[in-house]
Amino acid sequence: MKDRQKRTFYDRIRGVFPDGGAWDAVTGGAWALLLFIDLYALDALFRVIYSGAALNSPSLWTPNVFTLSWCAIALGIALLLPRAVSRVFAVAWTVLFAALMLLHCGFYGFFGKFFSFSDLMFAGDGAEYFEFSYVRIRIIIYIGAVLAAAGAVFAALMMPKKRYGCRRAVSGAAAVIIGVVGIKLTHDYFARQYVEVAWDSYEHSADIYQSFTDTPKSMMLCGIYQYTARDAWLASGIDEALSGDGEMLDLISAYYAARPESVTTPMTGVCRGKNLILIQLEAIDTWVLTPEAMPNLYELYNESVVFDNHYAPTYLAGGTFNTELMANLGLYPPIYGGTTGIYASNYFPYSLPNAFRDEGYTARSFHNSSGETYSRGLIHENWGYERFYGGGDIGMPDVFFDSGLLEGFDLMTEGGKFFSFVVTYSGHGPYQGSEVSNKYYSKFAEIYPDADDAYIHAMAHAYETDLFIGGLTARLEAAGLRGSTVLAFYSDHYNYYVGDDSLVMKYKGVDDERLMKRVLFFVNDVDLGAVRVEKTTSSIDILPTIADMFGLSVNTRYYAGDSAFSDGGGYVIFEDDSWLYGERYYIKGVSEDDDFTRERCADASDRMFYSRRVLLYDYFARAGS
């Protein structure tokens, strides 16, 4: 009985055959073939199901070469390892990539792009707000992941009991070598074809492979195995570290030296000497700014300098921090090779808080959550704020309710001249079961009886943010500070907590996911009154616009954006390298090229390329700027 219990799966199946040699002949190589096919099928299924994610996918043969090469490497490693270890490896490798496939699919369903290791910068903080209702994965992907894992387990159990021999070692080594050569040749092919700073060369797969910023196209070009390997390599920052630092620093210096040091506009200094409270609105989209949901903000909006065509692209997975850093630094975030460390330790002499402190202002920042979230405590102080105040620091009764931010009013307005940066929170999702929705949902269900559930939840959350704004203006009036204090507002991103972009596009009256990212940006100064600005702006233009209006003495050549009142800029660069310039809408890979388009593309490419390398290379510290 005891011996029978110890019989393996292999032994029981082998017993079906009258002659063990027949089974060995069948299974000797069958497990290897099954594992190889299993790994290839996993990637092929993923690419077929998500082929529509990449517009005009530029290549058909390269993902197959990459995937076949990686399958050969995985098989070779399995052959080289002892049988017990090989079993574990085969299953672990397959399960890992099956899990990554599910992660990519869930990520794409929410963000419209695939996961990148650089997004791990926000993983710990994002997990705090994660809800499974955000995840939308097709059932066939789940089935494929389970079948792939089952296939690997079956292949592992089929491995025959053979003494490790020379033939197996040679076969394994040969498979690894073939795989490495296949990857190297294809990688080198892209390197030969690549033309640096070729923004308009969307038809070239080499451009996509080298820049590796368009995750859907990069995935379809590489397959899941090569995408993972290259993504991890780029996210590690090793590629940048191995390049010539001195040469790159010289290139950055030459680029900025050719730009004007300062620009004067008709609005330069109109707010000079006044206080500023700059408020980043969490998920407050254009469609929630109604007299019913946000009466206080609505009134301010109609008495302000309003930037009607303002957009907030999300280059990073952390949409809030993405816009927060652009508004404070005037730089585009690097998509690869960036960690929170570059924001917590690099030198930023031209940041917004430093610009105000140079003019004799106090500079403080406030947010509901603690300083550990996104490492704001460290980062904000490194940017130049005297101190970051979390909800606990100012005694907020409940950090989910923005009205509690008024507990920090005295700290916000302390000092002869003050600049305070406030990041709201109540607009944040998830909505279902949230404390904010529980408090205000019925109120807005009555106001909007025919609206869908997501719309009502969004209005309830916006209302709580508006209570803070109403309380803030009332306190400023009572303190005699309203006339000397400018209130500036901008949205961090469109409201993606609705969980259905088609609904958001319906609310906003657009049929394009890029145009859906038009959000709020306006500056309220009681002495300026209502002004409408038609020029296209984006998050990168917030800092230079504020600096212009306050007449701050900063070297604006280092900002990637422009003042909304200057002759420069005037366009938003979206995540996929498309852009909007007034009525001119360039969609990369679709729009016709002409001289104007090529000139605009080259300018956009330079702005993003050099801006990101300022961060990656800690340019201001190393170049002594």
Image (spheres, grey):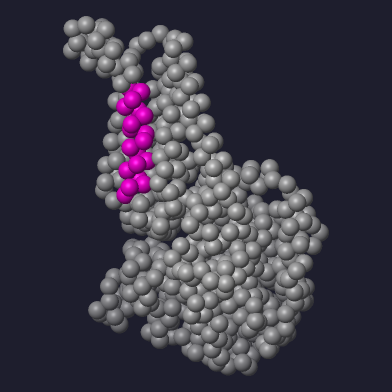
Query: Is the N terminus in the top left, top right, bottom left or bottom right quadrant?
Result: top left
Is residue 282 visible in the rendered image? The answer is no
Residue 263 painted magenta: no
Q: Quadrant of the C terminus?
A: bottom right
In the image: residue 117, left or right of residue 344? left
Q: Position of residue 291 (x, y in %)?
A: 40, 86
Residue shown at 69%/45% (left/top)? 243
Query: Visible in this render: residue 61?
Result: yes
Q: Which x, y percent locates residue 41?
A: 33, 37
**In-front residue for pair 117/489:** 117
Viewed as shown, does residue 514 lie left or right of 410? left
Residue 43 included in the magenta stretch of the image: yes
Region of the chain picked out in magenta, as a range:
31-49
Give the x, y percent position of residue 480: 64, 89
Vertical position of residue 13 compared to residue 317: above or below: above
By secondary structure, the bulk of the magenta-drawn segment is best described as helix
Q: Position of residue 39 (x, y in %)?
A: 37, 34
Is 44 on the left or on the right of 421, as rendered? left
Q: Who is closer to the viewer here, 154 or 166?
A: 166
**Looking at this view, is 375 or 575 the one in front?**
575
Identify which residue is drawn at 29% across, 12% down. 24
- What residue lies at 51% left-to-right and 26% top-to-bottom? 177
